Image (tube, rainbow, N blue to C red):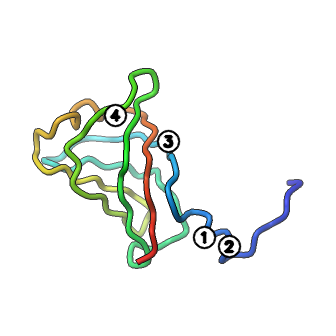
Amino acid sequence: LNRKLLPWDAWRQSFLGTHIYRLQFGDINGNIIQTNQLSIPWLPSEVTVALSKINIPGAGTIAIDYKSAYLTTEGGLYIYCSTAGAAGVASLKWQVVDATIVIQRK
């Protein structure tokens, strides 16, 4: 409570760039794994979301065969892998991870 409040535009800008978010992934459906825990004040039409790295606390960084990420209007993050059996994807099911995510304006 003892800090200066940022104007709305400055606060929104602070979400752009590369940040680490703690996420929990859910079920895997085909080649899609999702989480609904990424909350940013941007709409999918305004920004692009890219996954840079995933680190499972205590297990280290894991490699996934990553293709793209998609942000829903509710703040859910869908991660698409290039194949249903993509390397590393099965190890993400229900895992809490530190995901390095890049958010950029379109």
As drawn, 34 above or below 27 = below
Write down the quadrant of residue 61 in the picture.
Answer: top left
Q: Is residue 93 left or right of residue 105?
A: left
- Disc 2 crowd, CA 10 A, few/some/many (<14, 14-19, 20+): few
Which residue bears the numbered disc 3? 22
Which mark sits nearer the N-terminus, 2 or 4?
Answer: 2
- Residue visible at 17% across and 35% down in the picture: 87
Per the rendering, the mark at residue 101 is: none
Q: Which of 20 and 78 is in front in this view?
A: 20
Label 2, label 4: how far apart the Cα atoms are? 34 Å
Q: Which is in the foreground here, disc 2 or disc 4? A: 2
Amino acid on which the number 2 mark rests in the picture: Ala
- Residue visible at 23% across and 48% down in the picture: 66
Which mark sits nearer the N-terminus, 1 or 3?
Answer: 1
- Disc 4 crowd, CA 10 A, few/some/many (<14, 14-19, 20+): some
Per the rendering, the mark at residue 10 is: 2
Dividing the image into 4 quarters, which one contains the N terminus?
bottom right
Which mark sits nearer the N-terminus, 4 or 1?
Answer: 1
Which residue bears the numbered disc 1? 13
Per the rendering, the mark at residue 94 is: 4
For the residue labelled by badge 1, is the local secondary structure a helix, a strand or a loop? helix
- Residue visible at 60% across and 70% down in the picture: 13
As drawn, 91 above or below 103 = above
For the residue labelled by badge 2, is the local secondary structure a helix, a strand or a loop? helix
Q: Do the residues labelled 4 and 1 touch (CB within 8 Å)?
A: no
Q: Which is in the foreground here, disc 4 or disc 1? A: 1
Label 4, label 3: how far apart the Cα atoms are? 13 Å
For the residue labelled by badge 3, is the local secondary structure a helix, a strand or a loop? strand
- Disc 1 crowd, CA 10 A, few/some/many (<14, 14-19, 20+): few
For the residue labelled by badge 4, is the local secondary structure a helix, a strand or a loop? loop
Amino acid on which the number 4 mark rests in the picture: Trp
Q: List x then y, in percent, for residue 102.
A: 43, 58
